[in-house]
Amino acid sequence: MAGTISRGIKAPIIRQGDDIVNIVVDSVLAAAKEDNFELHEKDVVCVTEAVVARADGNYATTDDIAEDVRKKLGGDTVGVVFPILSRNRFAICLRGIAKGAKKVVLMLSYPSDEVGNHLIDLDLLDESGINPYTDVLSLDEYRKAFGYIKHHFTGVDYVDYYAELIKEEGAEVEIIFANHPEAIVNYTKNVILCDIHSRERSKRRVLSHGGERVFTLGEILNESVNGSGYHPTYGLLGSNKATENTVKLFPKNAQEVALNIQKEILKRTGVKVEAMIYGDGAFKDPVGKIWELADPVVGAGYTDGLIGLPNELKLKYLADNDFAGLSGEELSEAIRQRIKEKEGDLKGNMVSEGTTPRRLTDLIGSLCDLTSGSGDKGTPIVLVQNYFNNFAS
């Protein structure tokens, strides 16, 4: 009777240099023995990116960041555009950037950052008469209009917090508020675009308006600096605070680890599971309005069986329309038969209307992120079973 099962699996505390593949496989098989369940083909073994990067030792210091920033942007005035408001995600990156510059022009989007952390309430913005699409505000203008507002959940005034971080690293700071990235060129032509999912568009706009040395955050530490960690595609994107002067980067070996987990479980059990290294899930909190996805992707690495989108029929559509005159076992059997006969691609077909049009990796990764949590559950591994089953299975 069971449908999809998402099972958090406990693991040892993972340190740099640990064999992440064998730890994951050992943990999954130990859980199966202790909790009396079996692995099946198309089960999905998922591992949070944090422990994969930790085992790989993919760390960098603020000095490493500063050296890369000086090399790429010249070490004078640097524009830092559209950072998210996060002590965990961006604060230590900002320390490194400030350490590599004489002055930082920090440009914050308003009323919220890219992932939904609000500086100010939307109603307050409406009452102010300020046009967020066109108006560029100085710090004084911002304070006069909105005052000193602390984040709903963290209790932090991120404007002051980021300003103090920059000053602590010995750089001068100027803070402005705008929602069009090209506004930064009126202050400096040397720019780091810190937005996550719109970074390439922002870079194009800044370059077209006269930006000179323009980099995304994904192009800072995209190569090793003095033996530091790095990510060739995402650089500092997806990094997390490790210490007050160290960040853990997004795992650069995620694809290799996913493939090796699949291979090792097949070797030990004869069962071909799928495997995935996951980051933040992609979902929005209805109260805090935070869109969780602060990582560049949900699926950092995954096996081939997780490529694609769901291809599902909407059961309630079938019950209310095609089989409205049936009930009981006759209805169930008619639906089971329709599922067995469904086309290979239902895109655009009314019978799939209302099903979730998202990639499998985004759906499964979001499920895993909610299952593992971000605190002290101690389950960095999630086993998803029966995900590819349906009513006719």
Image: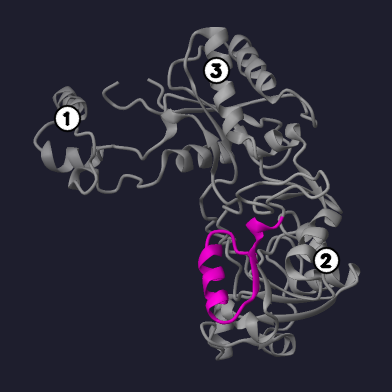
Amino acid identity at mark 3 = Lys
Asked which quadrant contains residue 316, the reply is top left
Q: Tell which of 111 and 155 is nearer to you.
A: 111
- Residue 138 in the image: x percent, y percent? 70, 87
If you read the primary sequence from the N terminus, does the residue marked by circle 2 or circle 3 appear first?
2
The amino acid type of the residue labelled 1 equals: Arg
Q: Residue at x 54, y 21 (%)?
A: 262
Q: Name the element at disc 2.
A: loop
Please tell me whether mark 3 sits on a helix, a strand or a loop: helix
Q: Amino acid at mark 2?
A: Gly
Question: On screen, 11 above or below 93?
Answer: above
Mark sitting on residue 254: none
Is residue 310 shown in magenta? no
Pointer 3 local density, CA inside 10 Å: few below 14, some 14–19, many at least 20: some
Give the magenta part as a residue range.
194-220
Is residue 179 visible to the viewer in this orientation of the structure? no
Q: Which residue is mark 2?
A: 100
Q: Which residue is mark 3?
A: 263
